[in-house]
Amino acid sequence: MSTVAHVTHEAVQKIGGIGAVLQGLLTTRQYSRNVERTFLIGPLHKADEREHDCLGEGGEVLYSSSMVIRKTPHSDALQNIEKTYQVNLVYGKRRLVDDDSGVTICPEVILVDVSSIALEQLNSFKLRLFDRFSIESERYEDNWEYEEYVRLAEPGFYALHTLIEGNAVSPCFIVAHEFMGMPLALKAMLDGQPNIRTIFYAHEVATARPIIESHPGHDTRFYNALDRGLDEGKSIQDVFGDQSWYHKHVLIDKAHLCDDIFAVSDLVVRELRFLAQPFLEAKIDLVYNGIPNTRLNLSEKLESKERLQKYAENLLGFSPDYVFTHVARLVRSKGFWRDLQLLRHMDSLLASRGKTAVMIILSSEIGSGRSSEDAHCMEAEYGWPLHHRIGAPDLVGSEIELNNGVTAFNSDSTAIKVVFVNQFGWNRERCGARMPEDMEFMDLRKGSDAEFGQSIYEPFGIAQVEPLGFGAICVLSNACGCCGFVRCATGGAEIPNVIIADYTHLNHVPDSLDGLLAIGAAEREKIEAENSWEIAEKLVTRLPRDERETEEMIRQGYEIAVKMSWEVVVENYFLPGLRHALDRHKT
């Protein structure tokens, strides 16, 4: 049996994708049977330091000097680490439960407050990072994202070492989730025991994201340049210039030194190979993300859809035949403009069939959303969320641009209307009195006829395929890493439940790499306009016309979702990856 220590910023709170991955992995039966001890290691912030519930609901603090809790025989050793590094530690257990399977796991948690760390020890560690790995920490010290995890590395490593009592027999895997975990993994390479293995868990390739998001050619330009660059033996820095300015790049650039790399999709594997020359020969295992596979019957789906239709009727004055959804963070990579482009084509197609639809976009630039009070006031004053006003508490930042697009679409459309709900949460309390009283978030997943997710950069995209098992048609771009897992689950066959738009295919491929790098907004928008017509026709054709077809979509979607479950991921990908890390270290 082994120990697995996950190093992440989401050791307690599920903030984004990594938290969802940990929830999925750790609550599987296969994980519980094969991993003896699990640690979650991350930063502790001063605001949480004296809170007895800082390990979440059901959590238990076993050691904290600030809370005067000493329930572990390792208390003295942990206190010595605090004194040596001038940090504050919280050690305890967190409770994770999978509501569907009933599996409960209580991983051990190590949180470290590094805000007042001893500079002598820190600078000594930074010097060792430079001497061994050529990392110039002084370039990035003003960036807290970098500084916090470099500070975390040594006290976090020694706390882990203390709690496993220096066991030099059973393997201990240090899993560095993204750049945040790399400093601790590098510390393990410097001072680890023979039983310790390091794994870099690539949920994305951080270097690629800003290149794709910041250039108007987006994925159309990047992936064509990547393919040509790899063919010519070039790296991302050869093609796109020096990336050493970026603190995330500097850390993940050393991931090839780990005993193994886990990549969440085939796309991420390609991006890693492109990152630098050593990655061409690095050991990389595919470890896809899993998706929910809760069984749903027809009546349950129709009940959820009826709630969504009733809400649409309360807002728009009509009950649509179809409900489309897009639930995502409001960032450029999600490609919301592609939704509107696709809907423009679909509008005439549905109108010619005498059908109507509503598209619900649930996304907010404010992470916690608007207060319930603000939501109800905006609803009463000017009809939010059907109507919006610029400025807090309503539209801010990139919400303004998206709403401009939605407003323009609604002014011209006939059969389809879009409702942009810039809120976090999906119930009457959070979204206003016009929402049905019994509405809940899962209605968006269960009741949707089609979930959109045509991203320009999406290393995997759990949210895009979450409604798959509930009978929704998932409309993806080929820049979504989950497409690879779908192909594995279906044997490469085209299925009615998934539609993949290709916005990177070029009808006329430039002869040179420079020609590919010159691809801009005009070329990309032309491809989007042309290819989205085909996608619109496919989607309209595949939308279920009656309850029998709806039931068949649920059956087919569920069969695919089962093959993409977290149990499958752990058994077929994650656990074999751990074994590979052991074997490769020996060689």
Image (spheres, rainbow, N blue to C red):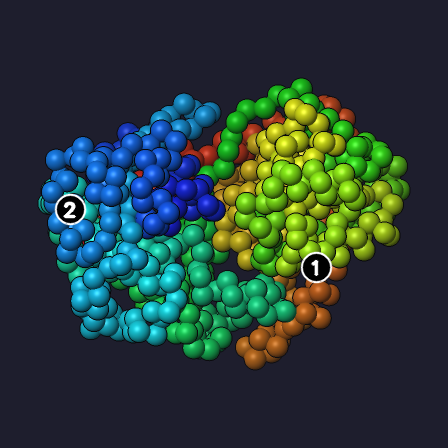
Q: Is residue 271 above or below residue 103?
A: below
Which label sits on residue 401? Answer: 1
Q: How many labels does the image show?
A: 2
Instruction: Say whether marks 2 and 1 touch (CB < 8 Å).
Output: no
Which label sits on residue 79? Answer: 2
Quadrant location of the N terminus in the rendered image: top left
Is there any visible trace of residue 1 in the rendered image? no
In the drawing, does residue 229 fall left or right of residue 521?
left
Q: Quadrant of residue 517?
A: bottom right
Q: What element carries label 1?
A: helix
- Label 2: how many Cα within 10 Å (few below 14, some 14–19, many 20+): some
Image coordinates for residue 306, horizontal then vertical, percent: 73, 26
In the drawing, does residue 552 fall left or right of residue 165?
right
125 and 267: which one is in front? Answer: 125
Q: Is residue 487 above or below residue 189?
A: above
103 and 529: which one is in front? Answer: 103
Q: Is mark 2 on a helix, strand or loop?
A: helix
Residue type, label 2: Gln
Of the image marks 2 and 1, the number of the one nearer the N terminus: 2
> In whole angstroms, how far apart are the C-alphas of marks 2 and 1?
51 Å
In the image, which is nearer the foreground, mark 2 or mark 1? 2
